[in-house]
Amino acid sequence: MTSTEKDAINILLRNPKFKELTAEEKNTLLVAYARKKKVVHKKAFDLIRIPDKIDFSSESSIMKNIKNITFIEVKATKNAKDAKFSGQFFGLTMREMIMGQTYKNKYRFIFVDVTSENTLEMDLKKLYSRMKIDLVGHCTLDKK
C-alpha cells in the first residue's frame, strides 16, 4: 500500500461509519460470509462501512449484521483534475470486479484526492459507465 492510499484511508476513517479491519477480523469476516455461502476476496476491499457497531471478532455478530456491511475499495490520487476525477487513471483487479458484480450496491469504490480531500463514491455499474479501458485492468474515468 502506498502512502497516498494510506492517506486516503485515513481521510475516510475520520467518519466513524468506516472501519479498517485487522487481519484477524478480516479472517473472521471471510468465515462468516462463507457460512452464508458467500465469497469475499480479502484483497478486494480496503474498508467496510457499517451503520452501527459490529463485533468483527465474532462470526455470529457479523452474520447477524451481514445486510448492513458495505465493502469499500479505495482509489487514491494526489492530483485529481476535477471533482468527478475525470481522466483519472487507476487499476481495477479481477477480484474487485467480481466483488462488485456479486455484492452490487454493497460494494463501493471511493475515489479520494488526498490533496483536496475531495471524494467520489460509485458502484461497479456507475464505474463501468464511466470507464475508458486503456489496458486490461487499467482504466481512465471519462467526464460523465
Image (tube, rainbow, N blue to C red):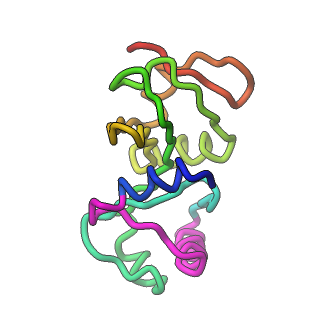
- Residue lying at 70% horizontally and 31% vertically, measured from the top left: 137
Q: Along the line of sight, which residue is nearer the eye, 49 or 16?
A: 16
Q: Quadrant of the C terminus?
A: top left
- Residue lying at 53% horizontally and 73% vertically, measured from the top left: 29
Q: Is residue 89 above or below residue 144?
A: below
Q: Along the line of sight, which residue is nearer the eye, 96 or 82?
A: 82
In the displayed orientation, state which residue is furthest to the top: 143
Q: Along the line of sight, which residue is nearer the eye, 98 or 3?
A: 3
Say if the magenta span includes residue 4: no
- Tell me the magenta residue range: 13-37
Q: Is residue 13 above or below residue 89?
A: below
Q: Quadrant of residue 116?
A: top left
Q: Quadrant of the N terminus?
A: bottom right
- Residue lying at 50% horizontally and 41% vertically, measured from the top left: 76
Say if the magenta span includes residue 20: yes
Q: Along the line of sight, which residue is nearer the eye, 38 or 61?
A: 61
**Could you tell me residue 34's position as x and y percent?**
60, 70
- Residue lying at 25% horizontally and 64% vertically, measured from the top left: 51
Q: Is residue 126 above or below residue 64?
A: above
**Relative to 102, is 113 on the left or the right?**
left
Figure label count: 0
In the displayed orientation, state which residue is furthest to the front: 115
Q: Is residue 31 above or below residue 110?
A: below
Q: Quadrant of residue 91?
A: top right
**Could you tell me residue 61's position as x and y percent?**
39, 82
**Could you tell me residue 74's position as x and y percent?**
49, 47
